[in-house]
Image (tube, helix red, strand yellow):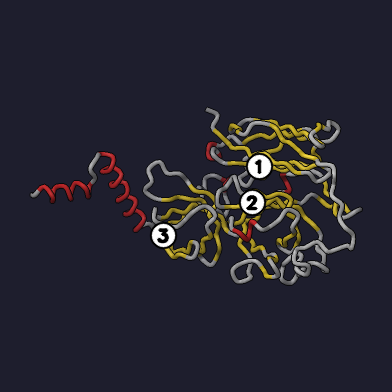
Amino acid sequence: MSYSTFRSRMDAKGGTRYERNFKKMSRSFELWFENTLAKEEVEIDGVKQFAVINDQNQNNNKDLSDDKYMVVKNESNLKVGSIMKWREREWLIFSDEEKSVPTHKQTKIRPSNGRIKWMIDGKVSGKDGDGHPAVIKNNTLYTLGLSTSGHHSWIVNAKMLMYMQDNPQTRSIKLGQRVFISGAVYQVMFKEWMSRNGMIQFLLEEDFVDPTRDNVELGIADYYINGEKPSTGEEEKPNPIEKTLVITGSDKAKIGSTVKYEASVYENGQLVPEEGVTEWTVMDDSAIATIVEQSTKGISIRIVSNFQKVGSQITIVGKTADGVLASKAVKIISPY
């Protein structure tokens, strides 16, 4: 055997012990990937490829849902926020897993349960005017209180959490904008795209359908005014009073712990002790936190004792009677 032949064989197996073990694991994964019964053809961001899709652990009753885990090869174009088509449904890539031994990519996927349409420069959003897929979850149980609509009407504080792919069109959705969800209209009261890189999440509260503004048949709110506030003929006067809401507390919360966050209202930089939060919301898509106590000055939440939630993130949102909003992102960590 010549030296060049010997080197080529060694390079194929791996020049070091780590490389040999890594290639052995990679070959083992390839063998499993090619022969598993859960392997199916999918389309991720327009690229057809094969993936292994697994159900969640059926022994864990708390996590029984349509959520699934997906495994693909390293060369896949998959990323958080990607849109996957499988079995005539659209799914959103919700989170990825940083593999300590990167033989493949593994992610959590959730089925889209609605397509959201809105007007952009006189045209309906989406590639072909069909809107964008979204994962929508009722968040009413995580909030308390009532909201006002108009001058005299009080409505139950119905809330929705909505997750969409982060792209230029979804980022164009403004605070206060109205969208249709399952025949009802909701108004965007909060949005952020920092906690899940690749996705944008919205907190919405229920509003009333206005036939003079909304196209109920197409499911597009503010269809007839292109999302612009109708003119009243009067010039809007700027509000000289600037109010801010600040939520203070730890940026991290241990599983199984109870944590408290306090709220303070400032007016032109001065603390206003008599004012506070009239409405608290916990943006939580994985049943991580439970509200223990809340008042105008603070909120206490209990974090579930489940190590599978380590690394997750929730967002606490406060709202004053004047409509001033503030948020606090909290990362879930291990107690050790």
How far is the residue under mark 3 from the one under mark 1? 35 Å
Query: Decide: marks 3, 2 in contact (CB < 8 A)?
Result: no
Query: Decide: marks 3, 1 in contact (CB < 8 A)?
Result: no
The residue lying at 85 percent from left, 54 percent from top is 149
Crowdedness near tag 2: few (<14), some (14–19) or many (≥20) residues, C-alpha within 10 Å: many
Crowdedness near tag 3: few (<14), some (14–19) or many (≥20) residues, C-alpha within 10 Å: some
Q: Amino acid at mark 1?
A: Thr
Q: First in sequence: mark 2 or mark 1?
A: 2
Q: Position of residue 81 (x, y in %)?
A: 54, 55
Q: Farthest left residue? A: 1
**Is 223 rendered above or below residue 61?**
below
The residue lying at 75 percent from left, 67 percent from top is 226
**Residue topped by disc 1:** 315
Query: Decide: marks 2, 1 in contact (CB < 8 A)?
Result: yes
Depth check: give the residue in front, 145 or 267: 267
How far is the residue under mark 2 from the one under mark 1? 10 Å
Q: Which numbered tag is attached to residue 39?
A: 3
Left or right of 200? Residue 215 is right
Q: Position of residue 134 (x, y in %)?
A: 62, 58
Q: Amino acid at mark 3?
A: Lys
**Residue topped by disc 2:** 201
Q: First in sequence: mark 3 or mark 2?
A: 3
Crowdedness near tag 1: few (<14), some (14–19) or many (≥20) residues, C-alpha within 10 Å: some
Looking at the rendered image, the disc whose residue lies closer to the viewer, 3 or 1, is 1
Q: Dot 2: what SS?
A: strand
Q: How many marks?
A: 3
Depth check: give the residue in front, 68 or 181: 181
Q: Dot 1: what SS?
A: strand
Q: First in sequence: mark 3 or mark 1?
A: 3
Looking at the rendered image, the disc whose residue lies closer to the viewer, 3 or 2, is 2
